[in-house]
Image (cartoon, rainbow, N blue to C red):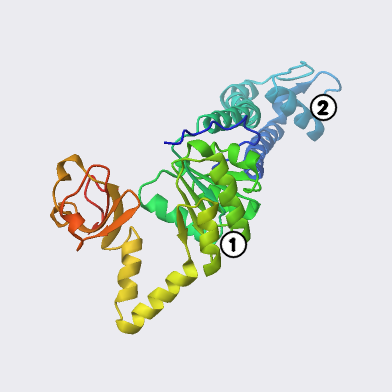
């Protein structure tokens, strides 16, 4: 068994979507603080008769604004002060709570944009350093997006999915569903090393161009010799190249679409059933799992979790009608159809 090689030092940080955009957060905080300050200014202006200015004896609007600012910031020079009982009561009951609220807003803003974001950057870096048993999606076009949505629908935690794509717009879509994202060129060793691809559970490649996909497969196989790789190619003559580059599974969506079209010509329900099998949202689901200890020695058609279709024994594919399917062996991989959601034990 090939041992996985640890990647070099991480060069790029992961990102994950935040609940509120930075500009919106800043605007809400500053707007709230400004509204509270102006409210206190209005109160002081209405009650300006209760204030005393030791400088010239009169309290103008500029004096009121000045007194409000030094009062809220707790500076207090003493040149303007409340002298009436009413003004002192207003300062104690209304202005003091607002003063604390404004201070908390600014302290909270400093925490959010300095301490919290520094903490989040550090936390994401720690997550990146500890990535293991995750799914790496290289390319977040239409196929990549559909794959991620189906993975999440099948129960995969979005935080266990890492998406690499050179497009910030596509990465933003991946962030919105909760994935970790990394902007970069997936054909480069350092980009794949940054997501610890050698420790991944699976690698899904859909770059949009066959030549780019094959180059990514070559890099991924070099960086992750023991990780299963699935790649999408669109030209028939590139399927063999993708397998030679190191892809374990090669999917040709053009050919698959042609098969569905041809099946539909023979029966109107074949294409619908094929789509049902492929999606976790259908009435039935096509799944692949290792043979259970209690199933060893039994025929494929005797499994209790679903209807067995095929057994993979090493690199051999054994159909349910083949004699070898009458006795399951340790290490076999079963492909079966089961009801959705699949019974416990199916994967």
Image: 19 above or below 244: above
The residue that appears at 21% across and 57% down in the rendered structure is 308
Q: Which residue is mark 1?
A: 210
Tell me: 36 left or right of 129: right
Q: Which residue is mark 2?
A: 58
Res. 140 in view: yes
Q: If the image is split into quadrants, where does the N terminus sit?
A: top left
Q: Is residue 335 above or below residue 274?
A: above
* Residue 335 appears left or right of 234: left
Q: Nearer the viewer, mark 2 or mark 1?
A: 1
Say which element carries label 2. Answer: loop
Mark nearer the N terminus (2 vs 1): 2
Against 54, residue 60 (above or below) is below
Q: Residue at (30%, 63%) from the top-left corner?
A: 282
Which structural element holds mark 1? helix
Q: Position of residue 189 (x, y in %)?
A: 63, 41
Kindly tell me whether residue 235 is visible in this rendering.
Answer: no
The one nearer the camera, 25 or 52, is 25
Q: Nearer the viewer, residue 46 or 294?
A: 294
> In the drawing, what numbered circle is on residue 145?
none
Mark 2 touches mark 1? (CB < 8 Å): no
| Percent position of residue 50, x then y | 70, 25
Q: On the image, which quarter does residue 116 sit in?
A: top right
Toward the right, the furthest residue is 56
C-alpha gap between disc 2 and disc 1: 80 Å
Point 21% across, 43% down: residue: 292
Rendering coords of residue 103 (x, y %): 63, 25
Residue 22, image quadrant: top right
């Amino acid at each position: 068994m090939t041992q996985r090689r640890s990647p070099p030092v991480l060069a790029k940080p992961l990102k994950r979507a935040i609940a509120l955009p930075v500009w919106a957060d800043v605007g809400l905080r500053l707007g709230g603080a400004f509204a509270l300050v102006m409210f206190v200014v209005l109160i002081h202006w209405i009650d300006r008769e209760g204030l005393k200015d030791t400088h010239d004896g009169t309290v103008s609007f500029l004096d009121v604004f000045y007194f409000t600012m030094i009062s809220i910031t707790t500076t207090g020079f003493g040149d303007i002060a409340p002298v009436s009982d009413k003004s002192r009561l207003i300062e104690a009951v209304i202005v003091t709570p607002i003063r604390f609220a404004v201070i908390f807003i600014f302290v909270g803003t400093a925490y959010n944009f300095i301490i919290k974001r520094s903490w989040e950057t550090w936390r994401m870096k720690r997550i990146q350093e500890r990535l293991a048993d995750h799914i790496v999606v290289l390319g977040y076009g239409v196929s990549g997006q559909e794959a991620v949505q189906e993975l999440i629908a099948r129960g995969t935690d979005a935080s266990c999915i890492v998406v690499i794509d050179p497009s910030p717009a596509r990465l933003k879509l991946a962030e919105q569903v909760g994935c970790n994202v990394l902007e970069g060129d997936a054909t480069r060793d350092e980009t794949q090393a940054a997501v610890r691809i050698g420790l991944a559970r699976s690698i899904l490649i859909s770059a949009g161009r066959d030549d780019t996909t094959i180059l990514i497969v070559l890099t991924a196989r070099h960086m992750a010799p023991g990780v299963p790789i699935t790649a999408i190619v669109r030209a028939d003559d590139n399927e063999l190249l993708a397998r030679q580059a190191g892809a374990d599974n090669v999917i040709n969506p053009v050919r698959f679409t042609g098969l569905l079209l041809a099946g539909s010509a023979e029966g109107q329900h074949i294409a619908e059933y094929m789509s049902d099998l492929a999606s976790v949202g259908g009435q039935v689901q096509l799944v692949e799992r290792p043979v259970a200890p209690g199933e060893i020695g039994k025929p494929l058609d005797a499994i209790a979790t679903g209807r067995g279709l095929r057994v993979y024994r090493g690199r051999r594919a054994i159909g349910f009608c083949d004699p070898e399917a009458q006795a399951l062996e340790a290490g076999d991989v079963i492909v079966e159809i089961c009801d959705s959601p699949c019974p416990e034990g199916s994967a």
